[in-house]
Image: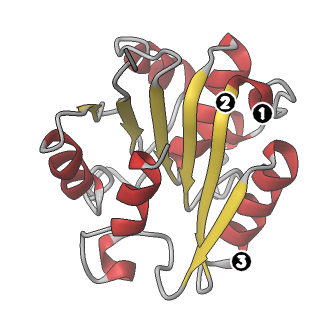
Amino acid sequence: MKEKINCVIVHGCPDNEEDLSYNKHWIPWIERELTSRNISVETPSMPKPWIPNYEDFKKEFEKYNVNENSVLVGHSCGCAFLVRWLGEFEKRVKKLILVAPWKLPYREDGSDKEFYSYEISSKVKDQVGEIIIFTSDNEVKDGKKSSEILHKALGGKRIELENKGHYTLGDMGKEEFPELLETILSS
């Protein structure tokens, strides 16, 4: 009997503590869609994402079941976390889906340098059944550069959609993200 997939979605990092949209955008919609199909979905709230700390994210993330039937989805800084975590723990997973991935420190105070500045393990691409990277034609320059860095290191399939920006609610204009749903559900 084929094991059911489970999905863990890691949200992005806001610029400041007042921006509480980091775990919104398309995440509640995709969670409802997957749950309605009897797929287990976890959407952990990462601690203080406005000052991302890898060790704190790791401690929270490891509360969730990740196995060979897992689909891991990251948004923005969540992508950088998942790639680093997979490289460190050498877990096998079904899919890794990176949505508007971010890999470059950008905060003027340098508080995010440690979070983003790590070498991508070459083992990650062998641990994952399928790697998909979503980007947009109107993503900002450093977002495009981040996508290129991760694609070069990991390979996989790149999907560039039109007018999705950084895949936030403000950029997309809606919370529905059917392309992601289809990608999670496809074998």
Task: Identify the image quadrant of residue 146.
Answer: bottom right
Residue identified by numbered label 2:
128
Name the residue located 65 percent from the left edge and 23 percent from the top edge: 86
Looking at the image, do the residues carrying marks 3 and 1 touch, with CB atoms under 8 Å apart?
no
> Helix or strand or loop: what does disc 2 sit on?
strand
Q: Which of 71 and 49 is in front in this view?
A: 71
> Compared to 66, does 45 lie above or below?
below
* Eye-nearest disc, 3 or 1: 1
Q: Can residue 42 be seen in this view?
A: yes
The mark that comes first in sequence, 3 or 1, is: 1
Residue identified by numbered label 3:
141
Name the residue located 64 percent from the left edge and 41 percent from the top edge: 130
Q: Nearer the viewer, residue 89 or 69?
A: 69
Q: Where does the image place residue 58, in percent across and percent down from the top left?
A: 50, 19
Q: Residue furthest front?
A: 1
Name the residue located 80 percent from the left edge and 62 percent from the top edge: 148
* Eye-nearest disc, 2 or 3: 2
Tag 2: amino acid: Val
Q: Where does the image place residue 52, in percent across and percent down from the top left?
A: 50, 37
Horizontal arrangement in the rendering, residue 66 relative to residue 177 (left or right):
right
Separation of marks 2 and 3 at Cα, in angstroms: 27 Å
Tag 3: amino acid: Lys
Q: Where does the image place residue 136, in percent across and percent down from the top left?
A: 58, 77
Horizontal arrangement in the rendering, residue 60 relative to residue 105 (left or right):
left
> Helix or strand or loop: what does disc 1 sit on?
helix
Separation of marks 3 and 1 at Cα, in angstroms: 25 Å
Local crowd size for mark 2, using a 10 Å CA cut-off: few (<14), some (14–19), many (≥20):
many
Separation of marks 2 and 1 at Cα, in angstroms: 6 Å
Local crowd size for mark 3, using a 10 Å CA cut-off: few (<14), some (14–19), many (≥20):
few
Residue identified by numbered label 1:
125
Tag 1: amino acid: Lys
